[in-house]
Image: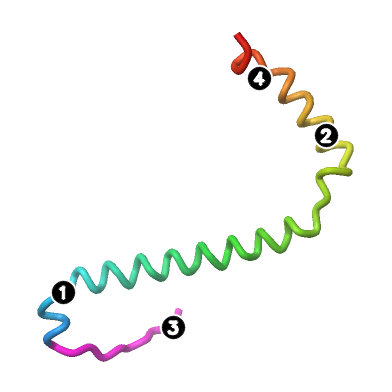
Amino acid sequence: MVEFKIQLEESFVQTMGYTQIETYLQEFMQKAVLKLAAQDILKDLESLDLENDQEWQTSRNLAWQQEKHKYFA
């Protein structure tokens, strides 16, 4: 793990509160990690061709047959 040190104006910390700033930075980093993971997933999805994948079409049709009663009364 890498540690970063940042400098903030004391008035800013007093206005916002140390805990609120710490929470914001932690949430920001969590979102950044999720965004990177999502970008990797999208790269993988670009290489998939579900329209021409027979196994995918079969699974999709089977799922529809099992669940269509929920949508048609």
Mark linked to residue 16: 1
For disc 2, the marked residue is 57
Query: What distance separates the C-alpha of mark 4 from that of mark 1?
Result: 50 Å
Image quarter hosting the N terminus: bottom left
Q: Earlier in the sequence, mark 4 or mark 2?
A: 2
Q: Is residue 43 magenta?
A: no
Left or right of 52 in this view: 40: left
Q: Residue at x 38, y 84 (%)?
A: 3
Q: Nearer the viewer, mark 3 or mark 4?
A: 4
- Residue type (three-letter) at the residue carrying disc 3: Val
Q: Nearer the viewer, mark 3 or mark 1?
A: 1
Image quarter hosting the C terminus: top right
Q: Most prominent secondary structure in the magenta stretch? A: loop
Rendering colour mode: rainbow
Query: What distance separates the C-alpha of mark 3 from that of mark 4?
Result: 48 Å
For disc 4, the marked residue is 67
Q: Earlier in the sequence, mark 4 or mark 1?
A: 1
Start and end of the magenta stretch?
1-10
**Residue 56, horizontal then vertical, whole percent:** 81, 38
Q: Quadrant of residue 6?
A: bottom left
Identify the element where label 1 is drawn.
Answer: helix
Q: Earlier in the sequence, mark 2 or mark 1?
A: 1
For disc 3, the marked residue is 2
The correct choice, above or below, for 65 with respect to 25 in the image is above
Query: What distance separates the C-alpha of mark 4 from that of mark 2?
Result: 15 Å
**Residue 11, horizontal then vertical, whole percent:** 11, 86
Q: Residue at x 88, y 44 (%)?
A: 52
Category of crowding for the residue at label 2, using alpha-carbon neighbours closer than 10 angstroms: few (below 14), some (14–19), many (at least 20) = few
Identify the element where label 4 is drawn.
Answer: helix
